[in-house]
Image (cartoon, grey):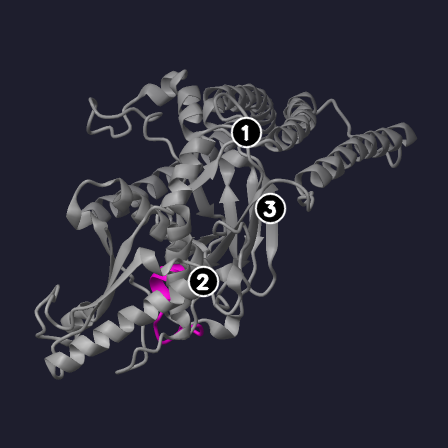
Amino acid sequence: MTALIITLCLILITIVLVQVGKVTELTAQIKGERQVLRDSSKWNGLLSLAFMVIFLLAVMISAWNYKNFMLGYGPHEAASEHGSVLDSMFFITLVFTGIVFILTHIALFWFAYKYRWSEHRKAEFIAHDNRLEVLWTALPAVVMTLLVVRGLNAWNTVMADVNPDEEFIEMEATGQQFNWIIRYPGPDGKLGARNYRLTTAGNQLGQDFTDPKNWDDVIASQELYLPVGKKVRVRITAKDVLHNFYLPQFRVKMDAVPGMPTYFVFTPIKTTAEYRNELRKYPEYNEPYDDTDPTGPKRWEKFEYELACAELCGRGHYSMKRILRVVSREEFDAWYKAQESYYLTQIRGKEDDPNRDRVLDIEVQQRAKAFSESIKTAVGSGNAADKTLTLKYISFETGSAALTPNSKYELDNLVTALNAYPQLRIEIAGHTDNVGEPESNRALSQQRAAAVARYLTDRGIEAARLQVAGYGDTKPVAPNDSDENRAKNRRTEFTIL
């Protein structure tokens, strides 16, 4: 029905235009062509002036009306340290081009009026005017030189890389259809190496997990966080097609090109909360965010910094939006501390892990810290159950009391703890599952506990502080009804006496 109505309207408009044309022809025949030409020129000139006034007023009024929504004006001053340099450059360019825009339009429509057709005026042809040539060549050249010099200074300021001795955060943004993969360095502050040949479904970035710097790297899954007032260096690349890393409020915009890494350095100077408070001062942002819910949150309350792709990278281009929160350094540190290593949580111990048979330095450090905290809790606890701790990361050769090489890290943690608490006495207890003869299990558990005690005494711990016991399968912590539960029962513990 709607299509039919539109079609009928178009037909009606066409008929009206045809009839207006016929009326114009009849009028010309009645009044005479010369009079029609005279009237037409007069009205065209007057209408040109009227259009000029209306057009320029509309441009100025609309610019003023919408200035609070444009970057660089109203509440949208740059939220980065370098942004004011770019805003200033664009503003000066706008001033010069704005003057030219207004003057040329005034001249265009004024000349259309002033030099409208008249039977008493004859056109004059001027082949050349040196003064005009010098004016419209020299003046734009001077202005262009000023803009270019200022632009080069701005470029050198904005695109300067970090110095090696500067304090900064480096992160990596990889564009793909249709998502940004954001990688942060771990506590070592360094991003690990990548090799596109290593890319798999589980290793989307092709991280080289033989590189220790990759072991603690973090891949942000949802919202991104940055600390205010700290320099950020973003490595930018793409996996498939051309993307663009765009943070409008920070005046950050850089192409993400497959096979050609780029970068951008900026320093956020406004937290998300501070930017919202700026918006709050303007009536436009105190309107409801959702027009259908007048009592709901205001526009300023729903504002978020946004990472977008500024290239038309495919049909799902819109879905590359990611929320960025700029927070205080304390809030960032708390968020950062809660992030987990992608390698340790998603790759470690699986088929894609090239380090399956190794204990990594980062694991040694983490285990040592956790062990120290467990000992501290156990020593300070009045609950007897808290005094018994399992040595989680020691193991023995199958059916033997010989410690595996990877067990030394856990036992070294126990040595450190016993040296830190010289008054501590412990019982080392071995346990097995119920596979095999009970007497054999008891003997094996006793031998394993003795092997642990021997490791400790070899490293300076007094034998008088250690007791050894082998309980075999008499103290299971889980039913011996599955491989998983039997593995839990094969354990070595120590109890603070």
- The residue lying toward the viewer, choosing from 133 and 182, is 182
Q: Is residue 222 above or below residue 104?
A: below
Amino acid marked by disc 1? Ala
Q: CA distance from mark 3 to mark 1?
A: 16 Å
Q: Can residue 78 be found in the magenta stretch?
A: no
Is 311 above or below relative to 275? below
For label 3, count other residues whose C-alpha is less than 10 Å away and answer few (under 14), some (14-19) or many (20+).
some
Q: Is residue 42 left or right of residue 401?
A: right
Nearer the observer, 341 or 152: 341
Examine the rendering and report whether any part of residue 343 can be seen: no
Residue bearing mark 3: 264
Number of the front mark, 2 or 3: 2
At x 82%, y 29%, the residue is 139
Identified by mark 2, the residue type is Arg
**Helix, strand or loop at disc 3?**
strand
**Mark on residue 78?**
1
Circle 2: element type: loop
Tell me, for residue 459, which label it has, or none: 2
- Left or right: residue 355 compared with residue 391: right
Instruction: Look at the image and give the residue range highlighted in magenta.
Output: 341-356
Mark 3 residue type = Phe
